[in-house]
Image: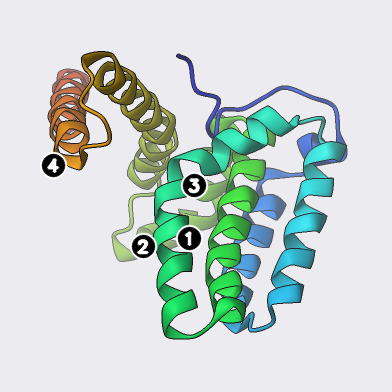
Amino acid sequence: MQSTLGLYQPGTSVFHRAPAGAKLLALVVLGAASVFLTYWWLVLGLIAVLLGAYTVAGIGPRTILRQVRPLLWLLAFTAAYHVWATGWQRATVVAGTIVLLVLAAALVTLTTPTTRLVDAVVRVLGPFRRWGVDPDRIGLLLTLGIRCVPLVADLAAQVREAQIARGTGTSWKAFAVPLIVRALRDADAMGEALVARGVDDD
């Protein structure tokens, strides 16, 4: 199964044409402002606005669902805990904020080529070279991070399908162990490839 989690989807919408730097700045502002979200109806309203933005960008419901599907267990646990501890309103705020930020970040990566995102980050960090910051290396790490999210999601889906085929039910151990092993194996392979290309720890 090929995941579309966070992968760029070409288009001509206003979101596709917007500068990568502006979208990253908006994402940072939203992330900072999310700390102050306390009203459940405001969170749901922002999610509705964001879903409208997905529509404008020409991104369909299936792709939207794929952005939050890997978090369903986390959202369910978070919501259940807060319903028990603080009530349904706080639960809606906390779980809704997670969904809001995930969808916002996904909208940026779905409408912006990875190279443009990396270039924007490198430009912003350029002045910090004098203090020993390596913008190119940070850009590389950003690229790897963006690429690893859908790869891990694909691994999780494959492990889950194999788990169902073996009839192991919903055992977390049967799911987590092979997922971690395969993720570490892929990470080792990626590390060896980077070293072979001259990327080391210096």
Tag 3: amino acid: Val
Q: Position of residue 168 (x, y in %)?
A: 20, 26
Quadrant of image for the C terminus:
top left
Q: Which residue is mark 2?
A: 130
Quadrant of image for the N terminus:
top left
Q: Tell me which numbered mark, 2 or 4, is placed earlier along the sequence.
A: 2
Q: Which residue is mark 4?
A: 201
Identify which residue is drawn at 30% across, 20% down.
164
Cα distance, mark 1 to mark 3?
9 Å
Identify which residue is drawn at 41% across, 62% down.
128
The reply, left or right, for residue 160 in relation to residue 16 is left
- Camera-side residue of 175 and 125: 175
Q: Tell me which numbered mark, 3 or 2, is placed earlier along the sequence.
A: 3
How many residues crowd around disc 3 within 10 Å: few (fewer than 14), some, or many (20 or more)? Answer: some
> What secondary structure is found at the residue carrying circle 1?
helix
Front label number (1 vs 3): 3
Q: Disc number at residue 139?
A: none
Identify which residue is drawn at 75% across, 31% down.
59
Tag 1: amino acid: Pro
Q: Tell me which numbered mark, 1 or 4, is placed earlier along the sequence.
A: 1
> What secondary structure is found at the residue carrying circle 3?
helix
Cα distance, mark 1 to mark 2?
7 Å
Q: Position of residue 113 (x, y in %)?
A: 61, 30
Q: In the rendered view, would you say 160 is above or below 165?
A: below
Identify which residue is drawn at 69% across, 35% down.
111
Q: Which residue is mark 3?
A: 122
